[in-house]
Amino acid sequence: RTPEAPAKAAPEVVEIAFTLNGTPVRMAVPADRSALDVLRQDLGVTTLKAGCSPQGVCGACAAIVDGRSRVTCTMKARSLDGREVLTHDGIATAEADIYAEAFARAGGTQCGYCTPGIVMATKALLDRDPDPDEAAIRKALNMHVCRCTGWVRIFDSIRLAARLRRGEAVEDEAGGGGVGRPWQRAEVREAVLGRRPYIADMTRPGMLHGAIVWTPHARCRVDRIDASAARAMPGVRAVATAADLPGDRKVGLIFRDWRVLVAEGEETRCANDVLAVVAADTPEQARAAAAAVRLEVTELEPLLDMEEAARRPEQVLAVSRVRKGDVDAALAGRDDLVVVEETFHTQAIDQAFLEPEASLVVPDGEGGFTVYSAGQGVYDDQRQLCELFGLPPERVRVVLVPTGGGFGAKEDLNVQPHAMLLARLTGRPVLLALTMAESARMHPKRHPMRLRYTVAADREGRLVAVRAHILGDTGGYASVGDKVLERAAGHAAGPYRVPNVEVEAVTVYTNNPVAGAMRGFGVNQAAFAMEGCLERLADRLGLDPFEFRMKNLLEPGDVFATGQVMNEGLGVKRALEALRPHYERAKAAGRAVGLACAIKNVGMGNGLREVGRVELEVVSPATVVLHTGFTEMGQGHDTVMAQMAAEASGLPPDRFRVSCSTAVAVETGMTTASRATYLGGNAARVAGEALRAALAEVGGDLGALVGRRFRGEWTAPATHKPEEGTELLARGEHPVTHYAFGTAAQLAILDEKGGLEEIVAAHDVGRAINPITVSGQVEGGVFMGIGQALSEDATPDDKGLPVDRYAKLGIVKARNMPKVTTILVEHPDPDGPWGAKGIGEIGLVPTAPAIAAAIHAHSGEWPTRLPMRDTPAARSVGARRSR
């Protein structure tokens, strides 16, 4: 039973006076209120982003206070008294232009959520040191986190800003902005300077604020929810429970099993569960009321061990199988084989994006709603909300707001239904924005897995068989867990020619936090195991790991593990060959090195029909709106879509403005599986060519086409479901499980002490639509891969509660980031737009196994468990020792 909260004394109110961007401010504030809350909520300074607030570790809320860059979420408002505070609005226009140009040209911003804080750190640094070296730059970024870029291009941006501030001449970019050339990211100036609003920055007249009441235990029976005290509190306009949401309260992308609200008499299934939601006039009032909701629950023993869950049939969500050839027959009676058997374990990881989940829902007064979402698929959001509330699609318009990172976790609905329920009950706009600690409860994590492998090769070094059993913990609800394990199964043999494959991947429910989509989508876990076995085989066969891989890598015409015949777009050998000089150089220098190769599907495939749709709307003589259903969440989608539309139409890319909402019928499905550039780009080419033809008819006068719309639609080649593939193979035919693949090879180099010195990443991107953007995607992927390998761990505690302190997630800081060298290999895909392939996910697939191989080369130990914290490599990136 929730204890009665003691009555709180009214907070002390103090008078403060300070200077904000040169203007004197005098106000009365509660003494315990944070400076960030006062600046954002009372003074409207939304260029400061809340991020991890009030944990003080991400730097998104940085301002310059008395000449020093400070995080404002941990400062008390009273400490502003007598200070001079500078935010982005106080930077002179000419200087602000320098930061915007530098970060735009060098590619130092992706989702943009961290960038305004980093700009303040940059200004403070350059004010005291106009020509800083790299050590000074890294030190200046110590209180900041960027989850997208991998830091490489942020360092470049700060160096470029320093040059521009010193008045040095800088070469212009190669012009044009069409396919294959640099083009500045869409809305980059607004993002860099904090002026592009995220959902939590938005307001509407009469807007209320929401707050959530969470389950106190991962598993418990909810006996009673008493909201009477909360409803009587000042400013409270509604308290909603499951009783306010009649009918089926469940949502889900594949399985509708995730309850939006848990009712009295039901059991909670994990820490993600919500018991009630509150709407009030201010965020503080809403949170106070949420804390006042009294809960009577009976705590129950949670099931947290996925091995135990696998022994209970009712806990099994799905089983995926891949079979090709006959593994038993291939292994039987063969004394010429070398066989490796090993078990690997990978951990839960938090996506750790910096923008906590938020949604703003505005009722139209006639039974309809506009939902501002930062999700990864506006049409999937719309479909689920319509199902939940029993509304037709025309009553629910979902508008994408630029997203401060997602990496898969924002595929599932999060707070959109809770905000919509409160808006429905109150008839007023409701903004529901989570804190970082709440975000850790809300969103799914990367699946922890156990992978048992048997891999055999003959004495000449040719792979003969792979057998794998993979077990994955999807937590309390399905999310997309079955598809994650399905993807791990399909990629279990990596990019190698293996005639006999047998894989079983089992997805189980537990009472751990939900696991779902995260960059790599199960393939990186499988790569850690498969590449680890290859290293062991090469060692036992006495073969060079580079040449062993070259001998076994798939080529066009070879058969993938699922039975698919690879087409001419496969470029993995070119990627590995690109590493050869770096590999030989490092070995000649006596460095410990490790290699890994990777293959990753483009598109969801496995029998799903996939269509790209775009509509180009000419709205003025100077502007064409490109309507898309794909989400911009930092990967550069809006930028490359404008470039591809420009290439197809003949117009410059700055004529295109990208918009994403359900108001235009361009449904494309979820922004996932590295599919947006591939599908959207092909559709943009079709629409752009139609626009080009229309321009030719009117003599190139875009103004003559105002009001016209040009639709582009492209359907991907058909694929087969896994069970169909098995049947085809049994008949001697070959299935198509995915219509395209990306491939890569990475090299990890350690220093003399075993610290991680450099990652060389060679990625076959098909065609680099925007070289800066695609390089940034590789570098950001490598950064995440280093974290997965050495430092990151979001394993819940022994009660099933998630890690909710951002500093404990193990994110690599700027000062510890090793060198990353990116090599773009352009081996065109036959169906990709201008030959392009998806790149968003594969960036980290080979990173952990490459580092594991380098660790073995240095220490002689064979890593089997991630993260590899107790190693010199881990210490070199700032990892704490294992708990």
Image (cartoon, rainbow, N blue to C red):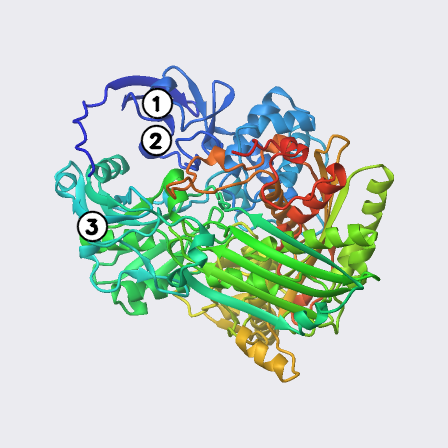
Residue under label 1, please give it.
Answer: 77
> Which residue is depicted at the point 31% across and 68% down?
394
Where residue 385 appears, as percent x and y from the top left, is 32, 62
C-alpha distance separating marks 2 and 1: 8 Å
Residue under label 3, please give it.
Answer: 240
C-alpha distance separating marks 1 and 3: 32 Å
Q: Is residue 321 above or below residue 234?
A: below
From the viewer's side, name the closer residue of 27 and 340.
340
Identified by mark 2, the residue type is Asp
> Which residue is depicted at the point 67% across and 69% down?
327
SS under mark 1: helix
Residue under label 2, please give it.
Answer: 37
Identified by mark 1, the residue type is Ala
Q: Which mark is residue 394?
A: none
Could you tell which of marks 2 and 3 lies nearer the N-terminus? Answer: 2
> Which residue is depicted at the point 59% across and 76% down?
717
- Cβ–Cβ below 8 Å for labels 2 and 3? no
SS under mark 2: helix
> Which residue is depicted at the point 62% across and 50% down?
844
Mark in the foreground, 1 or 3: 3
Where residue 36 appears, as percent x and y from the top left, is 38, 29
Left or right, residue 815 beside residue 478? right
Could you tell which of marks 1 and 3 lies nearer the N-terminus? Answer: 1
Identified by mark 3, the residue type is Ala
Q: Quadrant of the N terminus?
A: top left
Where residue 567 appears, as percent x and y from the top left, is 71, 72
